[in-house]
Image: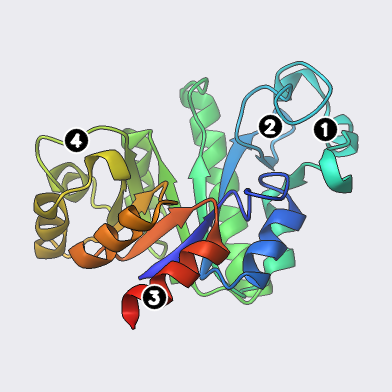
């Protein structure tokens, strides 16, 4: 079972920053999860929220700032907001990268631009930054977008995120031609995992920090868990495997 660091080692580093991602690798994570918005400049920005007040002393939407202004915003521990391409260049194929697309405020034209830029960025990562396609996993709560990407960038795994218990178990992911599904720990059960495996889908679970949840995911045959605390999660897995 893989351990993927949620926004990097976000338990003790500023989330979605170079420091958090590098610390996750130091702690032994198999992969990192990060969040991406399409900025008005046409660049893919690594940031969880639309607004920056939670991570900085400033207030406003990402698109209230120019790209240069965003990159100059001081985050804790001398960190800064990065481009997706910068993070991929930095990681340079050393681990899996789960790219969660944030699209709540996107219209059709914006989504089309996002897909074009994402496709270019992913292929650049495989040609210039030592990534294999299977190392770059795209996920989103926007299920129509996942269905589109499953056909558009078929070399790369794509997965719908769900925060509720799907009535069709893994059927919704199969209909999207997805490679897997990412389900919340609150809705994880044996039926979902077994159904996904039957349909050839991988199962990732978020956000898994508690020892009992780590053990449950392992017992059910989950493929990867997304955690805020990679070091302690890896240690707990070692105890389980003894």
Q: Earlier in the sequence, mark 4 or mark 3?
A: 4
Against 170, is 214 above or below?
Answer: below
Q: Is residue 86 above or below residue 113?
A: below
Residue wearing tag 4:
165
The reply to whether residue 144 is visible in this rendering is yes
Please indicate, yes or no, whether residue 179 appears anywhere in the rendered image: no
Mark 2 Cα shell of 10 Å, populated few (<14), some (14-19), many (≥20): some
User: Crowding at label 4, few (<14), some or many (≥20) Cα neighbours within 10 Å?
Assistant: some
Of pointers 3 and 2, the one earlier in the residue sequence:
2
- The residues tagged by marks 2 and 1 sit, at their Cα atoms, a distance apart of 10 Å
Check the picture and name the quadrant holding the N terminus.
bottom left
Frontmost of labels 3 and 2 is 3
In the image, 114 versus 81, the foreground residue is 81
Tag 1 residue: 70
Quadrant placement of the C terminus: bottom left
| Foreground disc of the pair 1, 4 | 4
* Structural distance between the alpha carbons of marks 4 and 3: 30 Å
Left or right of residue 228: residue 241: left
Q: Is 184 in front, or is 136?
A: 184
Badge 1: residue crowd in 10 Å (few <14, some 14–19, many ≥20): some
Are dots 4 and 2 in contact, CB under 8 Å?
A: no
Q: Could you say whether the residue bearing mark 4 is in a helix, strand or loop? A: loop
Left/right of residue 115 with respect to residue 54 in the rendered view: left
Question: Can you tell which quarter of the image residue 215 is in?
Answer: bottom left
Query: Which label belongs to residue 39?
Result: 2
Q: Position of residue 35 (x, y in %)?
A: 57, 42
């Amino acid at each position: 079972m893989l351990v993927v660091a949620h926004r990097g080692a976000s338990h003790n580093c500023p989330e979605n920053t170079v420091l958090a991602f590098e610390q996750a690798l130091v702690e032994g994570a198999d992969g990192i999860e990060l969040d991406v918005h399409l900025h008005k400049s046409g660049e893919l920005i690594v940031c969880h929220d639309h607004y920056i007040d939670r991570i900085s002393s400033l207030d406003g939407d990402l698109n209230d700032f120019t790209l240069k202004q965003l990159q100059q915003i001081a985050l804790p521990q001398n960190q800064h907001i990065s481009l997706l391409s910068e993070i991929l260049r930095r990681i340079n194929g050393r681990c899996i990268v789960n790219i969660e697309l944030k699209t709540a405020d996107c219209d059709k034209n914006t989504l089309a631009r996002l897909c074009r830029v994402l496709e270019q960025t992913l292929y650049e990562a495989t040609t210039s930054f030592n990534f294999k396609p299977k190392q770059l996993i795209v996920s989103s709560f926007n299920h129509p977008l996942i269905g589109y990407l499953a056909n558009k960038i078929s070399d790369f795994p794509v997965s719908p995120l769900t925060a509720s218990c799907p009535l069709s178990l893994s059927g919704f992911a199969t209909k999207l031609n997805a490679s897997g599904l990412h389900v919340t720990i609150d809705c994880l059960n044996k039926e979902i995992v077994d159904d996904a495996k039957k349909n050839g889908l991988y199962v990732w679970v978020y956000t898994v920090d508690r020892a009992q949840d780590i053990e449950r995911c392992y017992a059910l045959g989950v493929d990867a868990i997304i955690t805020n605390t990679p070091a302690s999660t890896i240690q707990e897995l070692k105890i389980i495997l003894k």
